[in-house]
Amino acid sequence: MGKTITEKILAEKSGRDARAGDVVVCHVDSAMGNDGSTPMALDYFDAMGGGKVFDPARLVFALDHYSPPPSVKTTQLHKRIRDFAAAHAIEVWDVGDGIGHQLMIESGRVTPGSLVVGADSHSVTYGAMNAFGTGIGSSDLAAVMICGRVWLRVPETIRVTLRGSLSRGVFPKDIALAMAGILGADGAAYCALEFSGDGVASLELEDRLVLSNLTVEMGAKNGVFPGDEATAKYLGREFQPISSDRGARYVREIELDLDRVTPKIALPHHVDHVVEVGEAAGTAVQMVYLGTCTGGRVRDFHQARDVIKAGGGVAPGVQLVVTPSSRTVLDTLTRDGTLGDFIAMGAVIVTPGCGSCCGTCGSIPGDNVNVISTANRNFKGRMGNSSASIYLASPASCAAAAVTGKIADPREFPC
Amino acid sequence: MKIEKSAYVVNQQQRETAPKRFESSCVMLPIDNIDTDQIIPARFLKTTSKSGLGDQLFNDWRYDESGAPKPDFILNKPEAVRAQVLVAGDNFGCGSSREHAPWALVQFGFRAVVSTSFADIFRQNALKNGLLPIVVPAAIHTGLLATPEAVVTIDLAEQTLTLAGGTKVEFPIDAFSKHCLLEGVDELGYILQQQAAIEAYEAAHTLG
């Protein structure tokens, strides 16, 4: 019987047959901890009698949730991570370098066919690179640090077949939200989501990162893309892709005609509370957040900038917050003039990192404020104020709201 | 009405051991998709100390803007302090991977959460921190929610949840997690016990 991409990677990494339902112990190619999860992992590491790290080259710590740290306590957490890393020769991505997930991709730590874990739920992002990426807890990270392995139950796979290509004004975030609407918050619980179909070729690697990133919002264990020319273009080299076999077993099949996908929006306070952006049109917003591991890449900022420029700038009373997902993204935006455009628009520019996404640093929305964001979660209190309401949409939809001061269809603007 | 911390700190001491068999009343929270931002908001993650996290459990539901407990919220009722079982809606624990979430539940005094389904990372984190994620069929779940005063018995060795009327419901748990919880060993400790067998296996099956 044929295998899915996920079964193939887990078979390779465990040295076993690895079929859905099997429990396998896998070699971990790379592991990432951030400043939210790592301090606790270091406690577990000590409690487990850690001593020496199995292979420091396969580990990296990202200081991204408190970037920059807003308090003495968080500064001390950073110090603890830096001290441990220095003692064990582990790489640290420091404050301002960017979000761990973005850096895992940029740095080349995630390669096609690799098995990569992160002590952060959005580690599913790595699947865009034709890899197995999944989130683990802090105690799991401590165990990986000690033994270089992780045990996993091989997930069943749901195949998502994408057809055609997106229409003007519609973006990868809209595909992901459409999927969340179809599957619901637990529709892919402990399943792999495997993307396939001719529509995959219409998406650049940066686009695929958006889709893989959001698969955890449907409960998925991982969200994996095939490897193709777009993957090779991003990597700058040829590679051996991991493909699913004919006859591989899928527990569910979903087909999405990309030409028919329209701009979507997730209403407060659930990611799967998805409607057409037009249905929420007219709702006043006071804060627009562009950033995060979902929507903080160069393409996202270009899409948003184009809409705001075409619309004549940011509406009075709207706070526009821009947080690039990495220093490289910030550097690119600086060199190509996009950052200057945002500054001229009156945007608040925040140090690369997670920023406002989960209320750990950056701008916190005020009481009863409506926020529209390119992020991945809109749970009550997510951005640090439980009286704020968070709407999730594409960068272009967020930009349309910035221009008009209310939720609007981005197709009303040239984009 | 402010709940005294000491009320569940006392309970906490007997709960540091793995939850093998116990009888308890339940706290009902019949809401689906309770995410880890609700269980413990990110702004309270600046600590790696477990103590005190129980105070912030469901913080934004539990306290008003001035920090005073909301009397209507179920965790602020006196009977909640004694309960060791939380019954919650589908897909409990979705969202961030933060391991503070099971900690906060354990610190409050919970030893088990009963639902129809759990988010994957939360389930794993719970098992590693002595909190049992118990999946029951929808009909049992509905029945439990309809009897808020019910006292249930949970037996890990038997893998059963016994309802007030005596009905026994089996619940699934992987053999490995069960072993670790019953024996009080962590996963790594277990793997290290098997070191010789692993090395023999690897010698015979080169991973390449």
Image: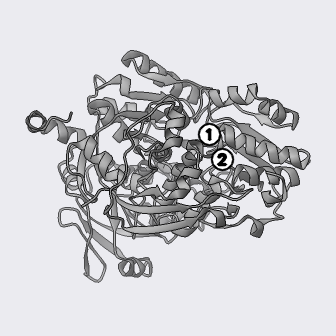
**Residue A360, which numbered label?**
1
Q: Nearer the viewer, residue A150 or A5?
A: A5
Q: Nearer the viewer, residue A106 or A76?
A: A106
Is A218 on the left-hand or right-hand side of A401? Answer: left
Of the image marks 1 and 2, the number of the one nearer the N terminus:
1
Question: x, y (%) of residue A53?
Answer: 31, 25
Question: x, y (%) of residue B120?
Answer: 39, 56
Question: x, y (%) of residue A109?
Answer: 44, 31
Q: Amino acid at mark 2?
A: Gly
Identified at 21% across, 47% down, the residue is B184
**Residue A384, which numbered label?**
2
Q: So how many labels did they put on this image?
A: 2
Secondary structure beneath dot 1 equals loop
Q: Is residue A286 visible?
A: no
Secondary structure beneath dot 2 equals loop
Q: Amino acid at mark 1?
A: Thr
Q: Quadrant of residue A389?
A: bottom right
Q: Quadrant of residue B186?
A: top left
Neighbourhood count class around disc 2 (C-alpha, 10 Å): few under 14, some 14–19, many 20 upward: many
Question: x, y (%) of residue A114?
Answer: 37, 38
Q: Is residue A316 visible?
A: yes
On the same chain, marks 1 and 2? The answer is yes
- Mark 1 in CB contact with mark 2 (< 8 angstroms): yes
Q: Quadrant of residue A55?
A: top left
The chain under label 2 reads A
Distance from disc 1 to disc 2, alpha carbons, whole Å, reads 7 Å
Is A266 on the left-hand or right-hand side of A54? Answer: right
Neighbourhood count class around disc 1 (C-alpha, 10 Å): few under 14, some 14–19, many 20 upward: many
Identified at 47% across, 56% down, the residue is A195
